[in-house]
Image (cartoon, rainbow, N blue to C red):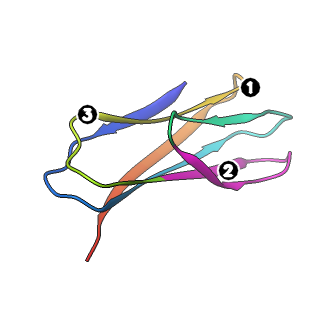
Amino acid sequence: MVGCTFSTSNSNNMIIGFGSQGGGSLVWTPGASFALILGSSPGNPRVNAECQIVSGAQNRLAVSVTSTSSNRWTWLGDAIQGA
């Protein structure tokens, strides 16, 4: 598993996680309460993205993904404040 955590002080944020992993046949599993919004087919590299809309402030919300492969990871997360 790879991931990061977010704390926010306002409501209506979109939390996004984006990952890349070196090739192979693998299965991405998004973190709890996250929706997989991008999942590439097997190849090199594999990428995925997941998101969750939160209605209130968050304290150490985990943004993570699990993979069936042991290849190297790159992971990026962001919180976008709603209007």
Residue under numbered circle 3: 60
Q: x and y percent of residue 45 in the render?
A: 73, 48
The numbered disc on residue 69 is 1
Q: x and y percent of residue 37 in the render?
A: 63, 57
Q: Which region shows up in magenta? A: 34-51
Q: N-terminal of the two: label 2 or label 1?
A: 2
Q: Amino acid at mark 3?
A: Arg
Placement of the N terminus among the 4 image quadrants: top right
Magenta span includes 46 = yes
Residue 50 is left or right of residue 61, and the answer is right
Give the SS element for disc 1.
Answer: loop
Q: N-terminal of the two: label 2 or label 3?
A: 2
Q: Give the CA separation, mark 2 to mark 3.
A: 24 Å
Residue 58 is left or right of residue 32, and the answer is left
Which residue is located at x 78 percent, y 40 percent?
Answer: 23
Q: N-terminal of the two: label 1 or label 3?
A: 3
Magenta span: predominant SS is strand
Residue under numbered circle 2: 47
Determine crowd level at label 2: few under 14, some 14-19, many 20+ residues with C-alpha closer than 10 A.
many
The numbered disc on residue 78 is none
- The quarter of the displayed image where residue 5 is located: top left
Residue 51 is left or right of residue 47, and the answer is left
Magenta span includes 37 = yes
